[in-house]
Amino acid sequence: MIKQALQALEATPWGTAVRENTWLFPTIESVHVLALVLVVGSIMVVDLRLLNLASRQRSVRELTDDVLPWTWTAFAVAAITGTLLFSSSALRYWGIWQFEAKMCMLVLAAINMGIFHLGAFRKVAQWDRAPAQPPLAARLAGGISLTIWVIIIALGRWIGFV
Amino acid sequence: MGGAVIKQFCEWLSATSLSQHIQDALWVIPTVQTVHIVSIAIVMTSMAMLDLRLVGIAGRRQSLTDMAARFLPWVWVALVALLCSGTILIIAEPGRELINQVFWLKMSMLAAALALTWTFQHMLRRSKTFWDRNRAAAVLLGGVSLLLWVGIIGAGRWIAYVEHG
């Protein structure tokens, strides 16, 4: 059943276009790279603040309010371009473990973010500004997030070598 | 004439023990490229924030001096990481970059972008309000800088897809 869905995806107009047009794949891939570096870079800004390693003078609340809208926008572009790239050879990518691992890591990143937002972030007013330090839960969330996103980049690049 | 010299250099470089070693150890190039991409994330995000602030689209509640002090150190450190990782990639596959029009286009855009960043930092040091007082120049510099960095990323990816030595 999954095989049929993947084949159907490959047969879509966009899947076909990306697969058959020589310059379309590199172009969409370039936009994917631009989007992903902005996702990871902006997440790093927040994570480094949670780890109390950078932007220490800024309020955590203000920082996330400023940065996260850009993160989400970039993520949307990355997801759309990623889907287009995937559609061009859905069956092949589905069978590549680095691709599957990358998708799992994305889910883990989401779970990590969810736990943080429902947990330590709810009391952010208590540790929002220097000299108050982010609690352990916040520092863990930041560190785990950074690690996961570097792994996502590595897996993403690795796909290209398979 | 210059082309022949580069070609000879690439042939010599790819025959060196170091280059052979890197080519044989299959994990090196993907790992070094990952370092390269993470460093790009740092540079691109920092420059995007600074340039959008210069152009006046975002981050207006922070002073330019503040933002520059927070982001530029990361940019310069990440650029060193990009230089190192980039050099390793060139040593591994010299012709892929050095005999490649898109690579040289990328380097030209990089030189221009770095010149703009230096100019931005230089004028800011001389006068904290320089860019606030010269809005037109600020918008121009920020806009061109942003376009260049986007171009650098695009060219970087296209290196793999065009004809090379």
Image (cartoon, rainbow, N blue to C red):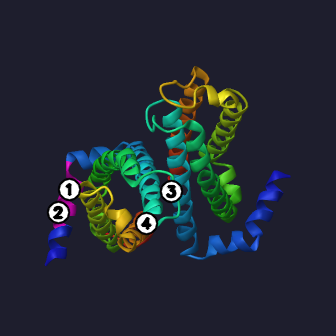
Secondary structure state at the residue bearing disc 4 = helix
Identity, as a three-letter code, of the amino acid under mark 1: Leu
- Reading the image, the residue beneath label 1 is B13
Instruction: Provide residue A53's location: percent of width, then percent of height.
Output: 44, 32
Does the residue at mark 2 contact the one at mark 1 (Cβ under 8 Å)? yes
Identity, as a three-letter code, of the amino acid under mark 4: Leu
Say which of A102 and B51 sits in front.
B51
Magenta span main SS:
helix
Q: Nearer the viewer, mark 4 or mark 3?
A: 3
Q: Earlier in the sequence, mark 4 or mark 2?
A: 2
Secondary structure state at the residue bearing disc 1 = helix
Does the residue at mark 4 contact the one at mark 1 (Cβ under 8 Å)? no
Task: Please say whether residue B49 is visible from this viewpoint.
Answer: yes
- Reading the image, the residue beneath label 2 is B9
Disc 3 chain ID: B
Secondary structure state at the residue bearing disc 2 = helix
- Reading the image, the residue beneath label 4 is B146
Instruction: Provide residue B44's location: percent of width, then percent of height.
Output: 44, 56
Q: Is residue A52 magenta?
A: no
Q: Quadrant of residue B133?
A: bottom left
Q: Nearer the viewer, mark 4 or mark 2?
A: 4
Q: Which mark is residue B60?
A: 3
Segment tinted magenta in the rendering: B8-16
B126 horizontally vs B154: left or right? left
